[in-house]
Image (cartoon, grey):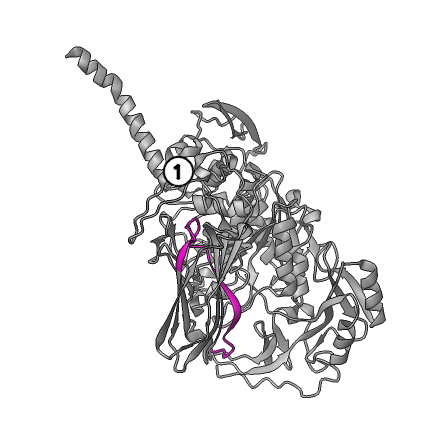
Amino acid sequence: MGKKKECRILKSFENDFKNINYLNNSDFSSKRIFVTSEFPCSLNGEDNILREESVNSQQQTFVPKRVYTNQWAVKIAGGHQEQADELASKYGFRNLGPVIPGGEFFLFESRTLGKRSLRKVRRHLHSSIRREENVVWLEQQVVKKRVKRDFLAPLSPHQLNQNIHSPSLLRGRRPPGISSVNIPILKPIIADGSVIQHADYVENNGGNGEMEEDYFMAGDDFLDMNRVQDRAYYARMKFSVPNDPFWKDMWYLHRRDDQPDEMDHNVKEAWALGYTGRGVVITILDDGLERTHHDLAANYDPDASYDVNDRDEDPMPRYDYADENRHGTRCAGEVAAVFNNSLCVVGIAFNAKIGGIRMLDGDVTDAVEATSLSHNSQHIDIYSASWGPDDDGRTVDGPATLTKNAFERGITEGRQGKGSIFIWASGNGGKDADSCNCDGYTNSIHTLSISSATERGNIPWYSEACSSTLATAYSSGASGERMIVTTDLRDSCTKTHTGTSASAPLAAGIAALTLEANQNLGWRDLQHIVVRTAKPVNLRAGDWRLNGIGRNVSHSFGYGLLDAGAMVRLAKVWRNVPKSKKCRAIYPNPYKTIPRGNRLHLQLYTDVCADKRDNHVKYLEHVQAIVTLSAPKRGDIQIYLTSPRGTRSTLLAKRQRDTSRTGFKDWAFMTTHNWGESAYGTWSLEIDNDGLDDAELLKWELVLYGTDVFIGPTGFEPSSALSERSVQTSHNGDSFTDSGVEQRSIRWILVFIASLLPLLIGLLVLS
């Protein structure tokens, strides 16, 4: 096919969109506006403008027209509802209430304007409202492009969707002789003076599975445990196979049963220890949740659900012939599908409560995102999001004002102050050489960004590499590799859930098991546990490197594959980390020209705010390089950051499709690769310009997040010498020395010598 005919945008918009035909609200939300049936246009999320769409061409012609809504976000000092009502009424609006509960931002809706317009409201109205005494800020809401990260164009006919609907499933796939449901029974075991628990599962015949040996892993062994999974313990554990018909297809949960040399998410160990998600609440931010699905209904939580698109309490998806809104229901099944009910699958956290926020099936605005991310934050523990800006290799987009506020309030106030857990899919733009560091959601310090690995441990063809990814969960891969099995619309099941969309809910389920093991974990505690327990074993990438404290890390896989068993074991003994500190270091006189075909190399020494007690960062967690630069072609720019310990992070890889001339303005490129390193010393920023014209650096600011005390293998230990010691590093390539590792090695040497003493004494006696 040739190029589609030019999209003709009408010059007159007296009646906005009167010549634009669309079937219903969802057709607009799916980012396709029909001027006529022949002339499709699509929404570009980065600039919120209409653009021409080409079929066999990567080139697109941009028409500079934003799509405005009839809603305004208004910040009112003090956040008083009465003042908001009066102000809205005065200017012909209806106050829809606070965007974030308890906050100062309110959402006003015009009583006279249409829902969408290509013209911004008259400037004098903005000026009049801004002059009101208590108004701090206001902004007309614009439509943002947000894409679900599941649908991937099949690489072969074998990857086409294959849904298995419930009528045939119930008739032909129910195992015979099912008389009872497996129920986990917690039994305390005394081991080494400590109480642990494990779950024996009631088998179908009424018997109990039993653990043949008591098992306990001391806290000192966690660093050793982090190297490989304890297969001996796993093999000793008996497990009653659930009767859910697609359990056998859930290779990512149990394939070590038959393939001991392969990896899985080790959830059976977490279950055997008694952790199934009980008491934890997860919500899926998506296109709706089929709450009536027979494999989800028992775990459905209405208090964790809301329809932001239609502003009501019911998150049920809108049905159409293509099942376009199946995404949220698929994600939910991975997390909390019911265990052993003869239907579909087993959720990783099958005793957790699951909710859904319907927010993608309509106009997505800053207010929609913020409302979704802050819904009932004292009740919901984990928010799972498998969507984001377009993964097209040219978009740079992220949270706007309201959504940033929702994240900040979530991590400071959510979960009774422990912090809401935000888990995000890293993106599917691999085929377009996209970078997830250009996605402000996965690139945020507030989110736990999850990438994907294929069944064979390879980098999926759709995966994006970036330094903000923390860890990895399984998903689909190339032809011949299995996908993710889960619930689907219309009370059905599917074996073809794909993309990073499928990885994030697996991570959410594992996080739920971890929170059940220790309900006092904060949002940063969970990230620390992920870093310490993720497994790089059998994940194939060419960029695995040891960071400055000896941890393997990759731009494709983060710190490795999530291990549920290791996470719950570490969570049980974890001590909460102290409050995070933040140190800023600004590069002086940053105005630098980057000649075409050249590299700019800058160095910045920091004493990590040693003279400021509240900002003193010795040991790192997240690191941001905030950059402002201009470039004739943004995609020609590459950025690298090297820490004082020699860890080099790729903050931005080359994006050939990104032809934007807008550059970057205060964009915070984030890396997790320096986790645990000392922050002292000289940081290096390298900027490559592969373009045909010069680029200009206008600003570089380094932001360090972390603590002023060392976080040990089981968290913060204020009463021990561990919290006060300094980490001594000798970095020459891959070498690293940690005094804690040395102490543990010395201890084991002494134990070994002590074990030989009786033999030596016996030999002396005989002699």
Q: From the top left corner, tell me how far across and down residue 512 is, in percent.
A: 56, 43
Residue at 53% in and 59% down: 444
Name above or below for residue 381 compared with residue 465. above
Name above or below for residue 537 compared with residue 195. below
Quarter of the image where the C terminus is located: top left
Residue at 81% in and 59% down: 81
| Position of residue 297 in the picture relative to residue 688 (left or right) | right
Residue bearing mark 1: 225
Q: Is residue 590 magenta?
A: no
Q: Which residues are magenta?
A: 658-682
Q: Nearer the viewer, residue 681 or 25?
A: 681
Q: How many marks?
A: 1
| Secondary-structure class at tag 1 | helix
| Position of residue 544 in the picture relative to residue 284 (left or right) | left
Q: Is residue 662 magenta?
A: yes
Residue at 67% in and 61% down: 318
Q: Nearer the viewer, residue 579 or 386?
A: 579
Q: From the top left corner, tell me how far across and down residue 79 is, in percent.
A: 76, 59
Q: Nearer the viewer, residue 26 or 144?
A: 144
> How many residues crowd mark 1 within 10 Å: few (<14), some (14–19), many (20+)?
some
* Amino acid identity at mark 1: Met
Q: From the top left corner, tell me how far across and down residue 247 is, in percent.
A: 50, 43
- Give the quadrant of residue 295: top right
Q: From the top left corner, tell me how far across and down residue 254 is, in percent.
A: 44, 42
Residue at 64% in and 65% down: 401
Name above or below for residue 498 compared with residue 730. below
Residue at the outermost front position: 611
